[in-house]
Amino acid sequence: MAEQQTVTISCPQCASPFSFREGDRNARCPSCGTSLAVSGEAGISRFWIEERIDLAQARANARRAVAAAGGDPDVVERLRFEGGELCFLPFWRLRGHAAGWLWTERETVTREEEYDENGMKTVREVRGPNQCATESVMVAVDYSSPACDVSRFGLRGIAVAGAVLPLRGMDFALVSGRGTVFDPVKDPDEVRREAVAQARARGGGNGVIRSSGRFSLCGERLSLISYPVWSLTFARDERLHPVTVDGVNGRVLAGRLPGSTHLTLLRPLLTVTLFVFAFTLHRLIGAAVAVGFLGWLAANGGLSPERLAGWFFALVERQREVELG
């Protein structure tokens, strides 16, 4: 096995030289005590955020979220918990500034005051000629974007979380022992293009009809952050229901669980009894009741042979699933 090399660098905080071993992910300056994250491949720093919610808390939060969303508490209690997995999802975070020029064409509006013969004032807005301008723009950028497809988890970005939560230098052996680490798929250049496009959309302000310009990033700090999410699985009968829970704040991000069920035995009996009673009184009354029933059924869910069969012969009705997130 090759012997590890020792690398010497200068601390960016106090400029004192210090050394660390090749392969280290974290280093501490012996002079000022500043903790540094050592950049990984292509000079990109990798971090991870430690979970604050354990499996039992995530499971309890999922059940509470279903009850709060209108699910039947009895159904929630009967759900079988099949298991959970902690997933560390990769997100790009890009900070810096987008600088360049921006050409804009804006609408102009002037306010005109008019007085009638009684001295009453009215104010009306009149559209004026469009105004064109070219200006230099520098926009602060703090952009985050998923580094792989995380749509099923319901998590879109972590810019705020990455700014306020403590970041740890990535230790793959440690993190993979806690859960599954997802690899990044999105290219860093794509993240840069997205960040520039977002900064460009923010430029110009209100009333812009058309715009064009050119921006470039400066002072870029690009990092890859692995964020914890619990992936849970519940089951009812033979059907599985996945639910994802934020591993930091415990918020349910996405999921779909079954709704309540109830017996409908009295519904067809009462309907048939009503028809028999109406036709007993008079055939026209019975026909009017039948037409009224069909009209009500058509206005509340549609009229079809399947709907009629379900109304008279379905003894158990299951409500729509409870959607979370």
Image: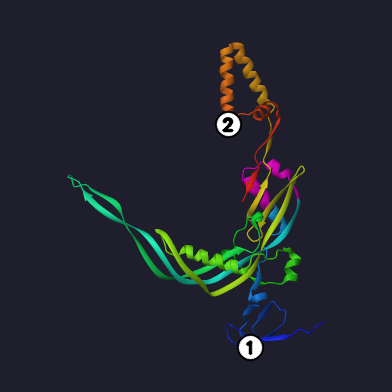
Whether residue 121 appears in magenta in the rendering, the answer is: no
Of 204 and 321, the residue lying toward us: 204
Instruction: Give the residues drawn in magenta, as a range.
Output: 60-81
Q: Which of the 4 quarters of the picture holds residue 238? A: top right
Dot 1: few (<14), some (14–19), or many (≥20) neighbours within 10 Å? few
Q: Secondary structure at mark 1?
A: strand
- Position of residue 195 in the picture relative to residue 304 (left or right): left
Tell me residue 220's x, y (percent).
Answer: 55, 74
Residue reaching furthest to the right: 1
The residue labelled by disc 1 is 17
Residue 229's disc is none
Q: Which residue is mark 2?
A: 300
Estimate the x, y position of residue 191 in percent, counting from the top left.
Answer: 59, 66
**Image quadrant occupied by the N terminus:** bottom right
Q: Amino acid at mark 1?
A: Pro
The quadrant in which residue 154 appears is bottom right
